[in-house]
Image: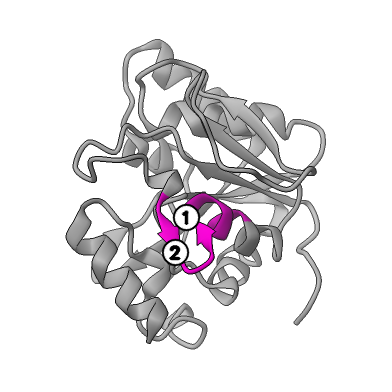
């Protein structure tokens, strides 16, 4: 399989305050790249266009010229605000978008493709592993912007609620094991210990 998947774009979230990490996760060094640069590169290899959603005024590492930066639709509203902003930015260009955060540095190309290719007709697709849903490594139709905007307007910032309301197709571990045997794509970095573990895996 090669080439980008048609009609699906990408949204990379980086607007979190990184409280537990103690420093902005977008700037964490992974090999020769910052975490945000690494995730954008991986996502761009499978879906395009890609937009990065961050906080207003947030300083970001250099990104490719074709990657657009947008700002959270509502300040201090968590990842759902970034999803809403990203879906709005992709309006009219694609049918759906693969969404992930810059703190998933072990994201695999095959994982993105496995999830995105199940989005027939622009359906939402959410991974399910060990009984847990992963709404921040998922695909959402652009029409889901209405749901996100409605939740934000009512103060409901829960991405789990948003994903459930999108009536997603669930892709279980059996559908992902061949492309990501250790499910590294689902690992997000929240604290220095997890960051150290990621560095060990990358070096190994």
Q: Is residue 109 magenta?
A: no
Is residue 62 shown above or below 195? above
Viewer-closest of 104 and 154 = 104
Give SS at disc 1.
helix
Question: At x 47% / y 46%, what residue is drawn?
Answer: 167
Q: Are marks 1 and 2 in contact (CB under 8 Å)?
A: yes
Which residue position is annotated with label 2?
Answer: 30
Residue 151: give its label: none
Which residue position is annotated with label 1?
Answer: 35
Query: Which residue in the rendered view is the most extreme toward the front?
Result: 32
Residue 23, horizontal then vertical, whole percent: 30, 40
Is residue 148 shown above or below 173? above
In which quadrant of the rendered image does the N terminus lie? bottom right
Residue 204, horizontal then vertical, whole percent: 37, 87
Tell me which numbered mark, 1 or 2, is placed earlier along the sequence: 2
Q: Residues within 10 Å of mark 2 (few under 14, many from 20)?
A: some
Query: Which residue in the rendered view is the most extreme toward the top?
Result: 153
Question: At x 49% / y 41%, what residue is drawn?
Answer: 13
Q: Is residue 37 magenta?
A: yes
Residue 151 placement: quadrant? top left
Question: At x 21% / y 56%, what residue is drawn?
Answer: 192
The stretch of residues the image draws in magenta is 28-40
Looking at the image, residue 129 sits to the left or right of residue 33; the answer is left
Give SS at disc 2.
strand
Viewer-closest of 126 and 199 = 199
Is residue 139 shown above or below 149? below
């Amino acid at each position: 399989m090669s080439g980008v998947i048609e009609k699906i774009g990408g949204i990379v979230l980086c607007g979190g305050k990184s409280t537990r990490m103690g420093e902005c996760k977008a700037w964490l060094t992974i090999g020769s790249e910052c975490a945000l640069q690494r995730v954008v590169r991986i996502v761009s290899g499978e879906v395009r266009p890609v937009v990065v959603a961050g906080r207003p005024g947030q300083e970001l590492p250099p990104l490719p010229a074709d990657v657009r930066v947008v700002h959270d639709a509502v300040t201090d509203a968590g990842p759902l605000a970034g999803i809403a902003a990203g879906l709005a930015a992709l309006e009219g260009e694609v049918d759906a978008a693969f969404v992930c955060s810059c703190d998933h540095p072990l994201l695999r190309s095959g994982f993105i493709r496995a999830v995105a290719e199940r989005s027939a007709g622009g359906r939402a697709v959410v991974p399910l592993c060990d009984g847990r849903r992963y709404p921040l490594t998922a695909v959402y139709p652009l029409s889901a912007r209405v749901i996100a905007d409605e939740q934000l307007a009512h103060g409901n910032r829960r991405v789990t609620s948003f994903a459930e309301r999108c009536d997603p197709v669930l892709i279980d571990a059996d559908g992902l094991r061949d492309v990501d045997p250790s499910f590294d794509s689902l690992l997000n970095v929240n604290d220095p210990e997890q960051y150290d573990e990621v560095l060990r895996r990358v070096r190994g």
